[in-house]
Image (tube, helix red, strand yellow):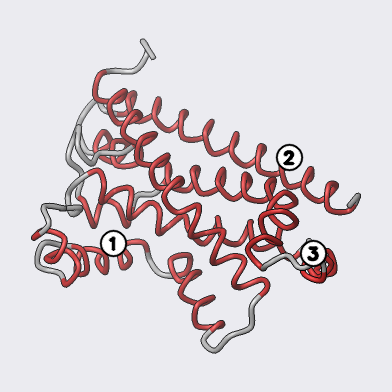
């Protein structure tokens, strides 16, 4: 990283931290929601599906504003958390929250497709042998959808790395605290002579995005072949 300046390196490190945290925290929820949408039939299922995918169609700034109104120090949840000593607005944890919400739909979609590719009869066979639903999921479904989970996590990580609109609206663009890779690119483009630093960060962003896409495609093909051969 010698070719990156201190501010660029700090932005990259913060982006990796934010993206990794966002991916790991949302992954269990992503698996649960994907399974619920793929296998369960319940009132409000379509509403849940719409809410999950809403960040994909809403302007990111709107999502960031809603987060600020909800988790800001004067927001209903933010005020309650502040009383417990937890503040996410204008903190790196808030950046992770915004990135996780924006990446969540991609994660859920990838995992859901993987679950829907599993033959339900295999799960039913496990249930007829006396296994509980959690046991069937752990011993039958989960091993078969691991590649889909990995693909979903990779896409979510890449999306979190590239998140800008919701993040800058919710946590601003504070160097060393909330300035992630996209925010740093934006900041460098606002000052004279910052084009070189912005270009270096753009190159890193492209490499991360392309690597994630190629890796997720490879994992997806492996998952399809594994399910087809089961």
Q: Is residue 74 shown left or right of residue 145?
A: left
User: Regarding mark 2 in the picture, which secondary structure is present there?
Assistant: helix
User: What crowding class fits label 2: few (fewer than 14 Cα within 10 Å), some (14-19), or many (20 or more)?
Assistant: few
The residue at which mark 2 appears reads as 218
The residue at which mark 3 appears reads as 126
User: What crowding class fits label 3: few (fewer than 14 Cα within 10 Å), some (14-19), or many (20 or more)?
Assistant: some
Image spot of residue 134 (x, y percent)? 63, 63
Q: Earlier in the sequence, mark 3 or mark 2?
A: 3
Q: Is residue 22 shown left or right of residue 212?
A: left
Between marks 2 and 1 in the image, the one whose residue lies nearer the viewer: 2
User: Regarding mark 3 in the picture, which secondary structure is present there?
Assistant: helix
The residue at which mark 1 appears reads as 64
Image spot of residue 30 (x, y percent)? 52, 59
Q: Residue furthest top?
A: 2
Which residue is painted at 73% across and 65% down in the image? 131
Between marks 3 and 2 in the image, the one whose residue lies nearer the viewer: 3
In this view, 120 is above or below 99: below
User: Regarding mark 1 in the picture, which secondary structure is present there?
Assistant: helix
């Amino acid at each position: 990283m010698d070719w990156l300046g201190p501010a660029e390196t700090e932005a990259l490190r913060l982006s990796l931290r934010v993206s990794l945290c966002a991916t790991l925290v949302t992954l269990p929820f992503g698996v649960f929601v994907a399974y619920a949408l793929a296998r369960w039939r319940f009132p409000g299922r379509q509403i849940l599906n719409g809410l999950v995918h809403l960040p994909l169609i809403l302007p990111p700034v709107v999502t960031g504003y809603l987060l600020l109104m909800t988790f800001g120090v004067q927001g209903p949840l933010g005020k309650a958390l502040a009383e417990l000593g937890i503040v996410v607005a204008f903190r790196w944890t808030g950046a992770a929250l915004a990135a996780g919400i924006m990446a969540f739909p991609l994660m859920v979609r990838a995992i859901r497709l993987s679950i829907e590719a599993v033959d339900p009869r295999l799960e039913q066979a496990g249930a007829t042998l006396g296994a509980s639903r959690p046991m069937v999921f752990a011993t039958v479904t989960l091993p078969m959808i691991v590649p889909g989970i990995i693909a979903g996590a990779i896409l979510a990580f890449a999306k979190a790395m590239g998140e800008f609109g919701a993040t800058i609206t919710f946590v601003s663009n504070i160097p060393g605290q909330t300035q992630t890779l996209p925010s740093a690119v934006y900041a460098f483009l606002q000052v004279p002579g910052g084009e070189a630093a912005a270009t270096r960060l753009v190159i890193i962003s492209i490499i991360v995005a392309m690597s994630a896409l190629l890796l997720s495609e490879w994992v997806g093909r492996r998952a399809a072949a594994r399910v087809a051969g089961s």
